[in-house]
Structures are given as C-alpha cells and as structure tokens.
Amino acid sequence: MKPVLNLRISPRTVQQETVEKLRQAIFSGLFQPGARLVESQLCAELGVSRPSLREALRSLEAERLIEIIPNRGPSMPTLTWEEATAIYEVRELLEIEAAGRCAKLITKEKLAALEASLIAFREAASSDDSYARVMAAAEFYAIILANCGNPIIEEVHRGLLARISFFRGRSMSLEGRAQSSLVEMTQIYEAIAAGDEKAARKAAHRHLVRAKAAAKAAMEQGA
Amino acid sequence: MKPVLNLRISPRTVQQETVEKLRQAIFSGLFQPGARLVESQLCAELGVSRPSLREALRSLEAERLIEIIPNRGPSMPTLTWEEATAIYEVRELLEIEAAGRCAKLITKEKLAALEASLIAFREAASSDDSYARVMAAAEFYAIILANCGNPIIEEVHRGLLARISFFRGRSMSLEGRAQSSLVEMTQIYEAIAAGDEKAARKAAHRHLVRAKAAAKAAMEQGA
DNA sequence: GATTGAAAGAATGTCTGACAATCTGGTTGA
DNA sequence: TCAACCAGATTGTCAGACATTCTTTCAATC
C-alpha cells in the first residue's frame, strides 16, 4: 500500500459551495416536490453568477437531486412509491453487504465512532427535530459504509443518499418510528461490535424491512 | 396506474450533445488515463463555448467519468486495481440480482432482443474491433438490467458502466477472453430464457468471477 | 360558455469577452 | 545543486447580451 496521504488542500470554489448550499436546502425540504427552481432567483439568493449556478445545477442533476428539462429548466423531481420500493431494494443489496463486511473489518476507533453516532441518534430520536434525526441516521450508516472495505459501495450509496434521506424524513415523522429505528440500529451496532457478520446482515435486513414498511405507511398517510 | 405517455419531445441541447460526444470519446479510449482535458482545446474541437463545455464537464464529473480538481481542471482518472476489485464486487451484487429477477420477469419481446444482442456479441467476439466487443457486451447487460424490474439497479449500474467498460476493454483484448465471455453470456441467456432464476444467478456469478480474473490478468500484464 | 389564437412577458440556452487567481515549467542566481 | 522567481498557460468567475422557447393572459370566434 502506498500511503498517499493526499495533502492537496482543495480551495472551495464558488461552484462547490453552491452545490453544497443547494444540497442542504434540498435536504431540509426547502423546495416542494415538483417545484421549479428559477435560475435568476437562485442566483440572487445565493449571490453567484448564472454560469456558476448552472454548473452547480448540472452536478445536482447528475446526482438526481434535481431534474433539468430542456427549455423548462430545473425542478424538484417527484418521487413515486414505485421508485421508493426500488431504492429500498437496492439499499438491501448494499447495506446488508456493507454491514456484513463491516462486522469483519471495522477497527476499534471506527467502532467507537459508530457507537458515538448511535448515541447521537438516540438523542435526536427523542427530540422533535426531524432534520436532526435524518442526519444522525445518515451519519450512522455513513460510518458503516465507509468501513465496509469497498469504496464503490460507499460511492453508490452516497448517490442514493439524497432520496434515501427524503424518505427517511417522511417515515421518521411517524409516531414511534424513530424509537424502533433506534432499537434496530442498536442491534446492527451490537452485531458489528461483536464481529458477527451473519448477525449484522440479519439486523440490517430487519431494519430495512421495517423502514420500508414505515416509509410506505408514511407515504400513504401523507398522500 | 396512470398511462402518462410522455410525449414531450426533448430538443437536443448543445450541452447534451457535448456530454454525449465526450462520453463517446472517453469510451473509445481517446484520452489516456491521467491525461488532462484542456477546456480551450475541447471547446475548439467540439465547437462549443466554454460555459457550455463546463456544464458538460460537470455532468461527466458527477458520473465519475472525469475528475475535476479545483484550479487544475478536468482530467481522466487513473483506475487502480483496488478500485477495480471494488467495482467487480458491486457488479456481483447488482448483476446477479438483475439476472435473477430478469429470469422471472422478462417478456418475450425483450428476450428476443437479448438473444439478438448475444448474437451481435458473437459477431463482435470474432472480430478484431475491441470497441465493438465492449459495446456489444454492454448492450447485452443493458437489456438484462432494463428488465430486472428495478430502475434503480439499472441507474446505479449505468453509473458504473464507464469504468466497467474500461476494464472490459482491457480484458477483452486478452487472447481467448472474448470467446469464453461468449460462452458464459450464453449460459446466462439460456438460464433467463428458461426462466430459471437460480441458474441465472449462478451463471451471472460465474461470468463475473472469470471476468474479474481476466481483468486482473490484463491489468498485471498491461502494467 | 368553451375553445382557439395571438401576443406579451418570463425564463432558458448559448455565446462573447473579460479579468483575477492559480498552476506550471523554465530560467536565473546563490 | 537547489531555491527563488518570473512568464505563459489555464482555470474560476463574472457581466452582459440575444435568440429561442415556454407560460400566461386576453381577446376573438364558434
């Protein structure tokens, strides 16, 4: 292994910051599904020029966070339950695999970080801040994915994260869902901590099955 | 179900065409790994303005087809064997699942298309055109993925396609690899045609194991 | 009254030109 | 030999402009 510690300090460019600001806005539900994003408005609000904004929008489009239709411009996509199902199925493939690998590979330090994120989620779960819950849950899984030994699994999962978070936000607002999530995530954590690959897979699977059911309930209720 | 026949004709914008031209160039190996893509040159060659080109580059960056480092500009990424391994592992997750689902779900028409693509690959396999081989193989899998009943699997796989094709190009140039690929792909096809989910999964798995070994051989040989 | 048509207004797609910040490579001096 | 420095090249960013394409409104027609 070459210890290529990549010391390149990356200066934050306007386009990067624009992407991040917009991503954050989308995550926190600032834009309604189907809403149109008018370039000139965003330019004014973000204080960037149109070319920079448009580059940022292209990045977000490729992440499937927004949709850009020629001559109509960018807008928030509307997620269907069909798509949600498909995403949950792919999550099963990725997260079960990641949890299983993680149980074998994770280091002590990272395990401690995982525990910390679990505790953070416990805090968030009993609070009223739905955004905080979503972010804490995302962090928990981010650590698992970062330590599964396969950067591509992580990359792919990150590509789905926006939409995952969207559904997470919905289902977490259900009565009691955050608490059951906490229980399920604790099981995942314990299996990983014990280095038990099979149990980790099982726990991840169970968590996803329930999360999916909760998301469905939230979606039907919300619709 | 709402039969939303989406009749919106999408006018091809300069941006889109630029993305496609560049993608094609990358696929056909026009740029060496690590090569830098100078904006002004590309503008001149493609006949588009810098803003349009830069938008296109952002799209390609998000697809991981190119890398953009602040203040250094876009360049072709260099793929490591570690990354290749990770990609093959994710391919296993996705393609095995897709092949299995496809065996249950595919329609007669699509099955015919799959057979046609297999025949096309047979042609390509005995030719000398490595690009044609790669494209034919990609087409075969594209049909399987499009008929697995999960658009997200397809989407994710497409996100990896560029890099998959890259390795495919390398390994297909190995003596005899195209022929064994043909055999393995035929097995996948037959299992799907028979509607045998288990066999399809097994065949897909076997194909991937061998493809991975071939890629490794090609990489070591090439390095 | 509902539908069609036209026209105004808004928004996007694209280009040109510009300039500061940054990187790169080679030259100079110690 | 090595470090500092300088010039050219390249990128990041902006402003402004204009043609094209929606959208919406309003009037005219059936």
Image: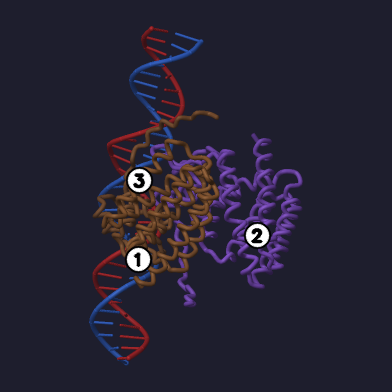
Chain colours: A purple, B brown, C blue, D red
Same chain check for tags 3 and 2: no
Number of residues whose C-alpha sits closer than 10 Å to that of mark 3, classed few (under 14), some (14–19) or many (20 or more): some
Structural distance between the alpha carbons of marks 1 and 2:
35 Å
- Element on which disc 3 rests: helix
| Closer to us: A27 or A3 | A3
Q: How many marks?
A: 3
Number of residues whose C-alpha sits closer than 10 Å to that of mark 1, classed few (under 14), some (14–19) or many (20 or more): some
| Closer to us: A188 or A168 | A188
Number of residues whose C-alpha sits closer than 10 Å to that of mark 2, classed few (under 14), some (14–19) or many (20 or more): many
Task: Tell me which chain the residue with mark 3 is part of.
Answer: B
Task: Tell me which chain the residue with mark 1 is part of.
Answer: B
- According to the image, label 2 marks what residue? A140
User: Which residue is drawn at the image coordinates 68% and 36% (left, top)?
Assistant: A221
Structural distance between the alpha carbons of marks 3 and 2:
37 Å
- According to the image, label 3 marks what residue? B16
**A7 horizontally vs A106: left or right:** left
User: Which residue is drawn at the image coordinates 50% and 48% (left, top)?
Assistant: B99
Image location (x, y in percent) of residue A156: 52, 56
Mark carried by residue B121 = none
Task: Tell me which chain the residue with mark 2 is part of.
Answer: A
Image location (x, y in percent) of residue B148: 50, 44
User: Which residue is drawn at the image coordinates 52% and 38% (left, top)?
Assistant: A35
Image location (x, y in percent) of residue A174: 72, 43
Decide which of tag 3 and tag 1 comes sooner along the chain: 3
Do residues under tags 1 and 2 come within 8 Å of each other at their CB atoms? no
**C13 horizontally vs A147: left or right:** left
Image location (x, y in percent) of residue A199: 70, 60
Three-letter code, disc 1:
Pro
- According to the image, label 1 marks what residue? B33
